[in-house]
Image (tube, rainbow, N blue to C red):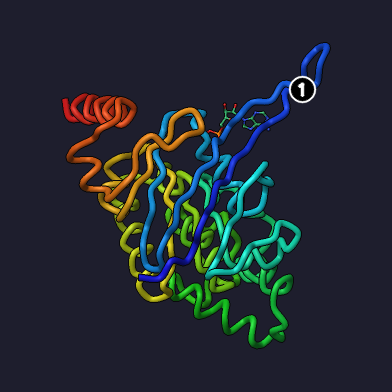
Amino acid sequence: MTVLLDVQDISKCFRLKGLLFNQNTFEALAPISFSVEANKTLAIVGETGSGKSTLAKILVGAESPTSGKIYLNGQLLQSQKLKQRCQHIRMIFQDSGTTLNPSLTILQLLDEPLKLNTKLDEGQRRQLIRTTLQKVGLLGDHMNFYPHMFSGGQKQRISLARAIILQPQVIILDEALAALDPSLRSQMINLLLDLQQQMGLAYILISHNLGIVRHFSDTMMVMSHGKVVERGNTLEVMNKPQHQVTKKLMMSQNFQLKHHHC
Ligand SMILES: Nc1ncnc2c1ncn2[C@@H]1O[C@H](COP(=O)(O)OP(=O)(O)OP(=O)(O)O)[C@@H](O)[C@H]1O
């Protein structure tokens, strides 16, 4: 059991612009602590506005926390060292396939992070791009193609290739699987699980879909109004939800599932 990511008392207050006083703050995240081990997946669920994306942004360094500390492999992550953070903690979004720059080839898209973060020469970078494309189930020769030449599922794989090419330790999947149809989604989940085993990755899965959470994650946290209201082993939480918010989330999804099958 190796703790890879250790989050201690991270909180976030946003300053709201008041009319007379500028001192109003909104606590989007109450101090929260958790850890994730290598090879494991932590799911974060909760209703809209519960603070999931704020937490993800803080983890990747896109937002700075009001308080708290983040350790990766026992080392404190400092907010000013963004380059180091980008390398070790990567994020994939739901629409990541559609945000690939259409004017760049796959080679150019994957070369960007390598040029920015490594000292590899052109030949080494090309080789790494080839093997990374193969790792995500694409062909090395796909590097010469443009994004529009790929299907939605393949574009997701390109985003995944971009996320893993710097050999990160943590990947945050922010509703990354939501836009895929069920069969592509299960292919993608299997690929993610394979990569997790191969690379010892820790995943943080932010998802509204409790079916995916159940299938994919080892532990889960349920958030409501910036606080963790329930956490634990995924199956245990789902089999015996304790908190009202968890019960409500599960009921609404059961309803949707039933609805779907009708
Ligand atoms: N820059 C900001 N300034 C003020 N308030 C903000 C800012 N960003 C987020 N918030 C507020 O913080 C709260 C948490 O937002 P967040 O996006 O983290 O929720 P979420 O759980 O990710 O929701 P969703 O499921 O819709 O993505 C919300 O009430 C939101 O309005």
- Look at the image and tell me in which quarter the N terminus lies: bottom left
Q: Quadrant of residue 3?
A: bottom left
Q: Quadrant of residue 102?
A: bottom right
- Look at the image and tell me in which quarter the C terminus lies: top left
What amino acid type should be assigned to the residue bearing mark 1? Answer: Gln
Q: Residue at x 31, y 29 (%)?
A: 249
Whole-percent x, y for residue 155 in the image: 50, 56
Q: Residue at x 34, y 27 (%)?
A: 245
Q: Residue at x 50, y 59 (%)?
A: 6
Residue receiving disc 1: 23
Q: Residue at x 47, y 34 (%)?
A: 227
Asked if residue 90 is positioned above or below residue 1 in the image, the reply reads above
Q: Is residue 97 visible?
A: no
Assign ligand 1 to one image quadrant. Answer: top right
Of residue 158 and residue 1, the one placed in the foreground of this image is: 1
Q: Quadrant of residue 41?
A: bottom left
Side (left or right) of 145 relative to 195: right
Whole-percent x, y for residue 79 in the image: 71, 56
